[in-house]
Structures are given as C-alpha cells and as structure tokens.
Amino acid sequence: MRVDIVTIFPAYLDPLTLSLPGKARESGLLDLRVHDLREWTHDRHRTVDDTPYGGGAGMVMKPEPWGEALDALATPNTTVVVPTPAGRPFSQALARELATRPHLLVACGRYEGIDQRVLDHAAARPDVAEVVEVSLGDYVLNGGEVAALAIVEAVARLQPGFMGNAASLAEESHEDGLLEYPVYTKPASWRGHDVPDVLLSGDHAAIASWRHEQSQRRTAERRPDLLAAASLPGGVEVRPSV
Ligand code: ADE
C-alpha cells in the first residue's frame, strides 16, 4: 500500500518511521511518504492560508498549493483522506475499509480548514476514487496531523503480513465488536492480587468461555452502545457489575 501525507509540519509525522509502521516501511508493505505542502507554493513567503470569504475568525488553507499537491501525487486510484472534526467517525470498520485501498493521500489541514473547492475538485478527478473526511472524535485538534498518525497506524497494522501474530489481531478490542478481555502474565500472585484461577487451569474451553464473558461484561459496563451492534452468542447473561 502507498500512503502520501501532505502537511505543513512534516516533522509531526516522524513517529511513523518508528515502531510498527517503521517495520512495515522497511519490509516494503507500506510505501509511506511525507510531503511539505509548501513545496507547492510559489511566493516568497510560501503562503498556504488566507482570510475566509464571508468574514469570521481564523484563516483558511488556500486551494492552489493543494491542487498542485494532488496533481503531483494522485495515482490512477487514489483515496483522499481528509482528517476533520466534521468527518465520518473513525472506527476499526473504517480502518479495515481503508486498508483495502491501494493508495491513500492524507491531506492534513490546519487553521479553520481547507478551502472546500479542494475537496470538491478532488472528488471530481478521474484519478481520485473517493474523498473520505474522517473525524478522530468529537473534540478539536490543532490540525489533521495527530489524526493522520492514528489513521495511518490503524490502517498499516491491518496490511496482510504486517502483524507477527495474526491471531492477536483477531482477538483485540473492536475486531469482534466487543472490548478485549483483561490479560495477565506471571507472577500468578502479585501484591495480593491473584490471576483468575481459570487462566491457570489449562482448560482451553473454559478459558475461551471466561474470556468471552469478560469481553461482554466489560463492553456492557464501558460501551453499552457497542453491544447493540455486536452479536452475542453463548447465552451469557450480561449485567453491569457495581
Ligand atoms: N482536525 C481537528 N480536529 C480533528 C478531529 N477531531 N478529527 C480529525 N481531524 C481533526
């Protein structure tokens, strides 16, 4: 998968060269490139913003540099991802969807946002398959960079062959619509807190059933909104504990 990130703060994306996405880059699963939007400005001050038509506070990102960035970076099948609090809520399902795309171009806005015509023009280009506006959550960040980090990390780790252990992908929070069960490691007893007996029993069926029940219980307590959407096999009664 190819990922281009366009930003006025390329250094913000440095963490993507570390850790798991860094490994994906080295192994060739992820062809990730970070670009400075100011490469596509032509004035002495490398201007990327201007005052909003209609008035109001803040500045708006100018269309011209974004248009040239797309001209330079769009491939025959590009998905333009625009982080914005006005976008589609990011979720594991959306990460899975984006992970199937051959080329993501993440356009990180700053200030009050990007001139709307950039998105409208991108959506009409033959080399752009879709424009997806994505929100990390109902809060406001200073720009799209932090959202881009989260989106690219969530998508990169879904690339086939990326995770060392495919089972760990399947078992984690949100993959089956439930939150993950609690996990423990050695020692079996620590500062008066014991690992649940069932996990020491060697009875794999009992362990699987305990874990499923714990997942359901946690989800009911912390995210009851998810339970409505999840399938609930097994007939375990779910009641929030007090
Ligand atoms: N840019 C600013 N706030 C954001 C948010 N909540 N999600 C995605 N991009 C953003």
Image (spheres, rainbow, N blue to C red):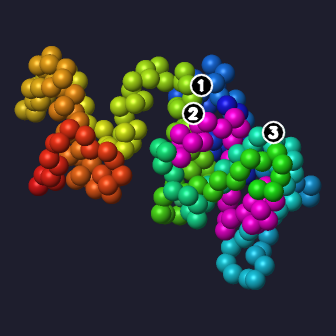
Residue in the picture at 78% in, 48% down:
128
Q: Is residue 220 above or below residue 203?
A: below
Q: Position of residue 65 (x, y in %)?
A: 84, 55
Front label number (3 vs 2): 3
The stretch of residues the image draws in magenta is: 94-122
The percent position of residue 218, horizontal first and vertical second, equals 23, 46
The disc placed on residue 156 is 2
Does residue 147 appear to the left or right of 181 in the view shown? right
Instruction: Point out the tag, 3 or 1, that comes first from the N-terminus.
Output: 1
Q: Which structural element holds mark 3?
A: loop
Q: Secondary structure at mark 1?
A: helix
**Residue 108 visible at all:** no
Q: Is residue 202 above or below residue 227?
A: above
Give the quadrant of the C terminus: bottom left
Mark 2 vs 1, N-terminal side: 1
Q: Is residue 101 in the magenta section?
A: yes
Marks 2 and 1 in Cβ contact (< 8 Å): yes
Q: Is residue 45 left or right of residue 54?
A: right
Q: Is residue 25 visible?
A: yes
Q: Residue furthest top?
A: 202
Q: Nearer the viewer, mark 3 or mark 1?
A: 3
Specify the label residue 75 is tagged with: 3
Q: Earlier in the sequence, mark 3 or mark 2?
A: 3
- The quarter of the picture where residue 54 lies is bottom right
